[in-house]
Amino acid sequence: MIDGAILVDREARIVWSNDKHVWFNDKLMAQLGLQSTADMIGQTVERVIPHSRMREVVETGRSLPLDIMRYGEHTLLVSRLPLRDERGEVIGALAFALKNSLTYLRPIADRFNKLQSRLNRVEQELAASRASQYTVENLIGFSPPMLQVKRLVRRAGQIRSAVLLLGETGTGKELVAQSIHAASDRAHRPFVAVNTAAIPENLLEAEFFGVAPGAYTGAGRQPRPGKFQLAHGGTLFLDEIGDMPLPLQAKLLRALQEREVEPLGSNQVVKVDVRIIAATSRPLADMVRSGAFRSDLYYRLNVFPIQLPALRDRKDDLEILASLFSEKIAISLDQPMRELTPAALDALRQHDWPGNVRELANVIEQVYVRTEGERILAEDFADILPGSAIQPPPPPPDGKRSLAAAMDELERVLVLEALEDSRGNKLEAARRLGLSRTNLYAKLRKHGIPSQPDD
């Protein structure tokens, strides 16, 4: 009944497989630069099988006896079991796919899809509540920096001390904060986030500590709780803490030390129990030295610091992140998912990503909106990432043209003919070629054809 099996060690690296092209295929191996299935040995399982749950089995020691897995064009019924030594310690994991599972899976898969749709609707409803939306499993990436972040997130979930998230804008600090909350014993309690940089300074105190009835002109007759009260028993996430004004820093420090707040316009204190996670993209240590940030508050927050890596420092994760965003955006736009070609991935790797993961998601969405095609090509990024160099393939050593080179030459000739027939009118030329205007301009740049204004 077994159609394919794979074995990993305690580090989730592949050590054996009886591959029958269930797990691997020639196309995937070519993308990974591997010549044969023997080259898979020693690779981390996620690199070969994206979204694999084998690492989860190794780390938890729990089996996953029945799971539906979508892998490329396959829908597999997979069982995953931990392997233990004679002392009972987990030393690896085994996964196998059931033979001819697709035929028997159709009724189950239909049911699975219906349940998945219902789950998505429930998740959308929960997004409006104060529940955490993300867990450590939502932290995508298996580069060494991201594996270190995941380890620290799990550790942070086991303690109750304050956590300080450091990193550039767009590295996913709120996602990490929610993952810590979900891994803690406060997961069933509220997760409240407040961006101190997005709230006017004169309203920050009311946002944090609440407002008593009639505290000022226009205040309501009912007390309005602040973020501390809303997060009582749970987690309060203070984003961009480095932008907090100095006067409010002193009041925040007192609230953290005394575990109580005094609503604006009230003489009564309210006891609160919150776990603080703060985040900033600014150099807090330097701000302390210059007097722009209180040292006592800094030491109060900087108990368990986690440095989030920039995307340029974890480019091993670019492929899986880009594929994930491509899948999500295709669903949101109700379009077929577009696979990224190796040349497109190379173009992404050449970019420095100052906006980090947030910028990558934006770039992939722009590609879907501005270009067409079954796959995402390197030239699709020409207008979106102007700094990315799209290198033509090197000529073959024997001087003979490859099929790709011949196709490129034919494409160039057809583009030139369409421009000549349309007298340089780009819109008309694109219509004759069956292309969008954006794709036509991309091909003009690809072939080095001068682009003059339309007649």
Image (tube, rainbow, N blue to C red):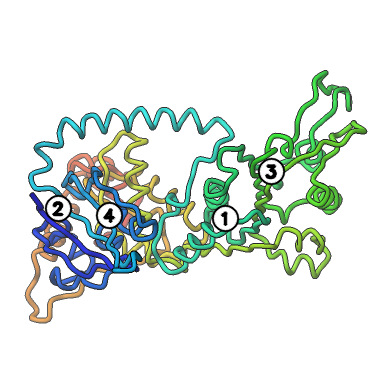
Comes first in the chain, label 4 or label 3 = 3
Q: Tell me how far mark 2 sits from mark 4, CA to CA.
A: 25 Å
Camera-near label (2 vs 3) is 3
Camera-near label (2 vs 1) is 1
Residue 449: x percent and y percent?
A: 27, 60
Q: Which residue is at the front of the view, 127 or 413?
A: 127
Residue 158, numbered circle: 1
Task: Write down the quadrant of residue 6 in the picture.
Answer: bottom left
Task: Tell me which residue sits at (41%, 28%) in the image.
Answer: 121
Q: Tell me how far mark 4 sits from mark 3, CA to CA.
A: 36 Å
Relative to residue 104, is residue 135 drawn left or right? right
Comes first in the chain, label 4 or label 1 = 1
Quarter of the image where the C terminus is located: top left
Residue 427: x percent and y percent?
A: 28, 41
Q: Callout 2, which amino acid?
A: Leu
Residue 369: x percent and y percent?
A: 36, 41
Residue 340, numbered circle: 4
Camera-near label (2 vs 4) is 4
Q: Secondary structure at mark 4?
A: strand
Task: For the residues labelled 4 and 3, say whether their Cβ atoms are less than 8 Å apart.
Answer: no
The residue that disc 3 covers is 198
How many C-alpha atoms fall within 10 Å of the one at disc 4: few (<14), some, or many (≥20)? some
Task: Write down the quadrant of residue 381 in the picture.
Answer: bottom left
Comes first in the chain, label 1 or label 3 = 1
Q: Tell me how far mark 2 sits from mark 1, CA to CA.
A: 63 Å
Comes first in the chain, label 2 or label 3 = 3
Residue 358, numbered circle: none
Q: Callout 1, which amino acid?
A: Gln
Task: Please state the total of marks drawn on the protein image.
Answer: 4
The residue that disc 2 covers is 414
Q: Tell me how far mark 2 sits from mark 3, CA to CA.
A: 52 Å
Task: Tell me which residue sits at (82%, 30%) in the image.
Answer: 211
